Amino acid sequence: MEDRTGLPVLTEPRDTLREGLSTLKEAGAVVHPVEAIQAKSASQEEQRRIQMLQSVYGTALPARMQLEQQILGRVQRLPGIPSSRLGLESLSGELDDFSFTSYLGHTEALETEPKGMHAEMEARLKLR
Amino acid sequence: MTAGFQFDLCNRNRLLESKGVQGASVTKTGTTIAGLVFKDGVVLGADTRSTSGSTVADKNCEKIHFIAPNIYCCGAGTAADTENVTGMISSSLDLHRYATGRESRVVTAMTMLKSHLFRYQGYVSAALVLGGVDFRGPHLFTVYPHGSTDALPFCTMGSGSLNAMAVFEAGYKDDLTREEAVELVANAIKAGIYNDLGSGSNVDICVITKGKVDYLRNHEYLQNKTYQRRHPVTYGKGTTKVTKEKIIPLSELTIQDGDATAMDTS
């Protein structure tokens, strides 16, 4: 679902009417080390978990788990509407986790407006 | 979206600082916290001052945070970081207890804390003293902001840690009784309060034993208050002059068992 080719600055959803055309200057360097950590740590830990499962249980189990993840991740609502990915969350263990995302960052509590479904769909279908 | 820390204002802050605007100072808990393992469990102690720069932000704050019914944690460092990290781990342990159906272990809380702090490479400035009693006995750990931990029979953290550690080193023995342990920890915290600028106000103590927790909030109240407000305020009879008096004895009243009509709520 999330395969976007090209620079994120040019392909991510953007409200051109409100924010203007996107420029490469905005991509720039990462402003804070913690931002880099937050962006990479989730995928890095997932990689580590899969490697651990491979070395302990063999390659078949993580391959089957990834297949199940793909199947469970396919059912989603359009962006902007919260979709309950119960199966996916219980498979990856997110259901039993409690972290920042569980009590911060809810769309109802944000001060800024969310990007909107149309901008997201345009980016996803590469219509920009 | 990435919840947690947001970075859209970092560029703005950098621009403001280059123009010479001073940022707001963070509320730290320049602190003395200490913990001790005694015969039946763990005693945790903390002072109650939280500072923002050179001003006291909170004269009586709570630095001993709840993690689980059998685990408590003292926090030093940035106040927001310690409160939020301990709150998050407490909720995480709650879910863990539902999943496993067992009492939480202190090492579980310690591992959750250290992996979270290590992931943020020391930017979450929380130095913690974690203590509790589980089925394997009493445990006491220190967790440093970068994610390293120590398992010790007695430990101190914060800006007043050296003052408190001196008292511990002089007075600690194995298998202290509960009274001796509470007195030693209170003395250690008081050494930090009297000799360190960042610590002050009162002493909080938390005694954790198997199946029981005694949270002695303000165990020693060192602030001298000149005026104690009583709430609610009671005025003695005769403060206001009585001009008229009518007494209706209750025995003269009759109670009617009529139809109770419902309130009009629409």
Image: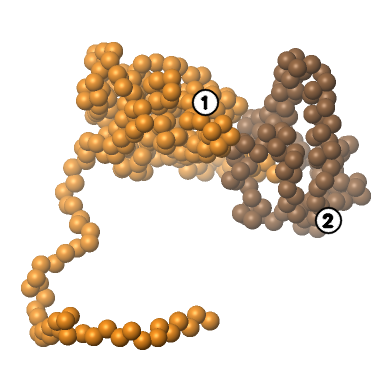
Chain colours: A brown, B orange
Label 1 marks a residue whose chain is B
Task: Using residue B71 as the reference point, say whether residue B41 is left or right of it.
Answer: left
Task: Using residue A52 as the reference point, say whether residue B148 is left or right of it.
Answer: left
- The residue positioned 31% from the left and 22% from the top of the image is B40
Q: Residue furthest front?
A: B257
Task: Using residue B234 as the reference point, say whether residue B157 is left or right of it.
Answer: right
Give the percent coordinates (x, y) of residue B185: 27, 25
Question: Is residue B207 something that shows in the picture?
Answer: yes
Task: Using residue B220 as the reference point, say whether residue B237 is left or right of it.
Answer: left
Question: Is residue B78 something that shows in the picture?
Answer: no
Mark 2 and mark 1: Cα distance apart in space: 44 Å
Kind of residue at disc 2: His
Give the percent coordinates (x, y) of residue B4: 61, 40
Locate residue A109: give its quadrant: bottom right
Q: Is residue B157 above or below residue B242?
A: above
Q: Is residue B217 above or below residue B197?
A: below
Give the percent coordinates (x, y) of residue B186: 25, 28
